[in-house]
Image: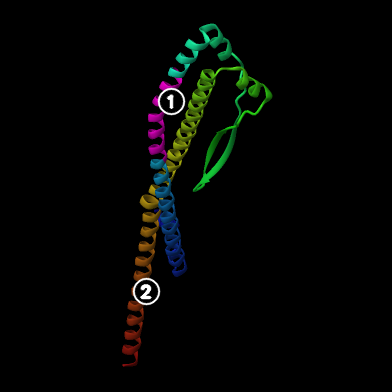
Amino acid sequence: MAVNDVKITRLELIHTKSRIKVASKGLSLLKMKRSRLILEFFELARQIQLMNQNVVEHVSRAIDSSKIAEAQSGRLNFERIAARKRNEQISVNVSNVMGVKIPNLNMLQNSSKSLKYELISVSASIEDVRKNYSTLLTLLIEIAEKQNSLKRLLHEIEKLNRRSNAIENVIIPKMQLRSKYIKQRLDDIERDQIISLKVIKRKIGNAHG
């Protein structure tokens, strides 16, 4: 704090105390937001952990259904069907969590005529393979979405930590020192004025005496 930059006035003291109150209120809001985001972060992490456990089960199910379909349809026929081109579409929406934009991915249902024809022309075992891998793909997309959200939340939490630490450990202490310094200087000035008045009064009294 540069002494030359500090105005030693009652008004400056009032303004400094007001800025301390505003900074303290802002700090409280930042901490509340950070706490909410931390809760959201751990909830997402919990969901991802559960979904990762489900991935293993869905991969195993998809592989087993592929083996059954290949055995029933023959390798060449199975590979021919597997090589058919599919156009999967994903919609992207954005939700807002305490000011943090979180993308939400959703697979769109394919209702094309070619798909309807395909479902009629393939065996039940092939359809099981399609369903299992479609479910697996949806699960992987959901995990990717949540992992991306997790990174965004972590970035925002770290940013809030830096801001709240700066306010709590740098800005507010500096303003408190400024307020204390102004208060001490004003008290010194007031004390000097009282002493000066007493001296003047005593001199006036001696002159009349």
Specify the quadrant of the image occupied by residue 17: bottom left
Residue 123 sits above or below residue 111 on the image: above
Please name the residue shown 41% across and 34% down the image: 48
- Amino acid type, residue under disc 1 in the picture: His
- State left or right for residue 138 relative to residue 1: right
Query: What residue would you read off at disc 1?
Result: 58
- Amino acid type, residue under disc 2 in the picture: Glu
| Crowd rating for badge 1 (residues with CA inside 10 Å; few <14, some 14–19, many 20+) | some
Principal SS element in the magenta part? helix
Q: Position of residue 154 (x, y in %)?
A: 42, 39
Looking at the rendering, the stretch of residues picked out in magenta corresponds to 44-63
Question: Which callout, 2 or 1, points at the residue further toward the start of the chain?
Answer: 1
Residue sticking out furthest to the top: 76
- Mark on residue 190? 2
Please name the residue shown 45% across and 60% down the image: 22
Specify the quadrant of the image occupied by residue 46: top left
Q: Position of residue 63 (x, y in %)?
A: 44, 18
Q: In front: 181, or 43? A: 43
- State left or right for residue 30 relative to residue 120: left
